[in-house]
């Protein structure tokens, strides 16, 4: 496979890679870039299904919405989200790295939105989101939001599968991957 990017086969499909995390959860991703570093192949990937995040919506206008990072205690809330999504012929998947939604879902186009139309007015907020669904659970309002910025996953390739790069390894290889991508971009000019 070329290290310049994903190869396209005769059908026009971008190759996919199955990524596993330490817990054994899986996430099917499109291969965007293959980057050889330190004698290993690292892959820059994007999820096939739509990534979403669970957010507790503030009760009043002065409060702040809170992204629920730790999902291990959120199963009762996610079960309600499952039911709401099923009404729209969508399925919530508890994938490696992130929650995803599968089904016939129109992807948001970040260029369609003005800055004042987007959620995430916080100046330090780098990711902008579009609400997919809103629902009530445990007497609080929640929503599943789609990030408008591209959602990338970094994996180390082993035996044709991706192993999620996390923690210290991610901290070490992230700047190397960014430098390689910058170099490739300059080479294309």
Image (tube, helix red, strand yellow):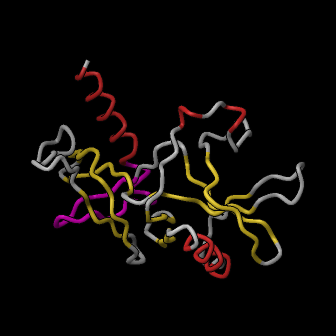
Task: Check the image and report above or below for 67 versus 173.
Answer: below
Q: Residue at x 48, y 51 (%)?
A: 106
Q: Give whichever of 48, 97 is nearer the camera.
A: 48
Relative to 143, does residue 126 appear above or below in the rendering?
above
Q: Residue at x 86, y 53 (%)?
A: 63
Residue 144 horizontal/vertical position (percent): 62, 61
The quadrant of the rendering that contains the C terminus is: top left
- Tell which residue pokes out farthest to the top in this image: 189
Q: In the depicted view, which residue is nearer to us: 118 or 11? A: 11
Q: Nearer the viewer, residue 99 or 186?
A: 99
> Observer-nearest residue: 152 or 156?
152
Query: Which residue: 44% across, 65% down?
Result: 102
| Residue 173 rendering spot, x and y as whole percentages | 36, 48
Q: Is residue 80 magenta?
A: no
Q: Which residues are magenta?
A: 153-172
- Residue 34 in the image: state x and y as whole percent: 23, 46
* Residue 155 part of the magenta-drawn span: yes
Left or right: 160, with 152 as reference point: left
In the figure, is residue 78 to the left or right of 153?
right
* Residue at the (65%, 30%) spot, across then down: 114
Number of callouts in the render?
Answer: 0
Residue 90 placed where, x, y %? 50, 68
When the figure is inspected, residue 150 is found, relative to residue 133, above or below; the finding is: above
Which quadrant holds residue 79?
Answer: bottom right
């Amino acid at each position: 496979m070329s290290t310049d990017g994903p190869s396209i086969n005769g059908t026009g499909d971008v190759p996919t890679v199955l990524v596993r995390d330490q817990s054994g959860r899986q996430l099917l991703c499109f291969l965007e870039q293959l980057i050889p570093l330190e004698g290993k192949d690292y892959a820059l990937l994007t999820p096939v299904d739509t990534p979403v995040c669970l957010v507790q919506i503030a009760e009043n206008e002065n409060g702040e919405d809170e992204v629920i990072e730790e999902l291990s205690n959120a199963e009762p809330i996610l079960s309600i989200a499952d039911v709401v999504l099923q009404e729209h012929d969508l399925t919530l998947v508890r994938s490696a790295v992130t929650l995803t939604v599968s089904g016939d879902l129109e992807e948001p186009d970040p260029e369609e939105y003005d800055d004042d139309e987007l959620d995430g007015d916080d100046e330090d907020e780098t990711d902008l989101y579009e609400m997919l669904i809103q629902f009530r659970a445990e007497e609080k309002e929640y929503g599943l939001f789609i990030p408008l910025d591209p959602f990338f996953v970094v994996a180390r390739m082993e035996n044709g599968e991706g192993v999620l790069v996390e923690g210290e390894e991610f901290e070490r290889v992230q700047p190397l991957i960014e430098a390689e991508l910058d170099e490739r971009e300059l080479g294309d000019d």
